[in-house]
Amino acid sequence: MKRALHLIVLLGILSFGNGNRAFGEEASIVSIATPRGSQQSFILIKPDHAIASVILFAGGSGNLQLNRVPPPQVGPYAFVAGNFLVRSRVKFVAHDFIVAVIDAPSDRPRGMSASFRLSKDHAIDIGAIADYLKRQVDVPVWLVGTSAGSWSAARGAIAAGRDGIAASSMASC
């Protein structure tokens, strides 16, 4: 309950943030190979002075289709997916969070099922993304999900078993 209240307060603060703040780096699509052999793509946006990293998990199938041809526009104000957490990524960056918005992995072209979101394979992919972010800047990594994405956030945090990674989840809005 305390974590849920903390997340609600954090998101409330973020909603009043200045969305016009300059970013240290443009949004880009990053694709990494995971230890289990899949490709994991995500939108990456880095502020000038990061205080933490957030990995955002959309609900539903989590299929953002970042690998489509031609690739989607991913600038801070482009790529408006239906999920409010994906749309809110600029708010996190405005408050000095490195943001990674996760797509379904390459071996899940139709998206992530509930059983995959709770699987060891998904936890391995999440760990690879967290490790990538930690190599960028050594700051805490937070996992944030909405709806079915909260299963991913919880699974990743449970599997992490190390300091510096925490999860929060939200109900659908």
Image: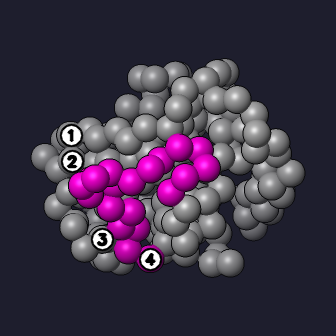
* Residue annotated with mark 2: 39
The vertical placement of 36 against 32, above or below, is: below
How far across and down, in percent of the image, does residue 60 sit?
44, 77
Which residue type carries mark 2? Gln
Residue at (76, 39) in percent of width and height: 20
Which residue type carries mark 1? Ala
Which residue type carries mark 3? Gly
Cα separation between marks 2 and 4 = 20 Å
Q: Is residue 167 visible?
A: no
Which residue type carries mark 4? Gly
Q: Residues within 10 Å of mark 2 (few under 14, many from 20)?
A: some
* Residue annotated with mark 3: 111
Judge whether residue 65 is colored magenta: yes
The vertical placement of 6 against 26, above or below, is: below
Q: Residues within 10 Å of mark 1 (few under 14, many from 20)?
A: some
The vertical placement of 38 against 110, above or below, is: above
* Residue annotated with mark 4: 60
Which label is found at residue 33?
A: 1
Q: Which residues are magenta?
A: 60-79
How far across and down, in percent of the image, does residue 107 sit?
17, 61
Q: Nearer the viewer, residue 108 or 138?
A: 108
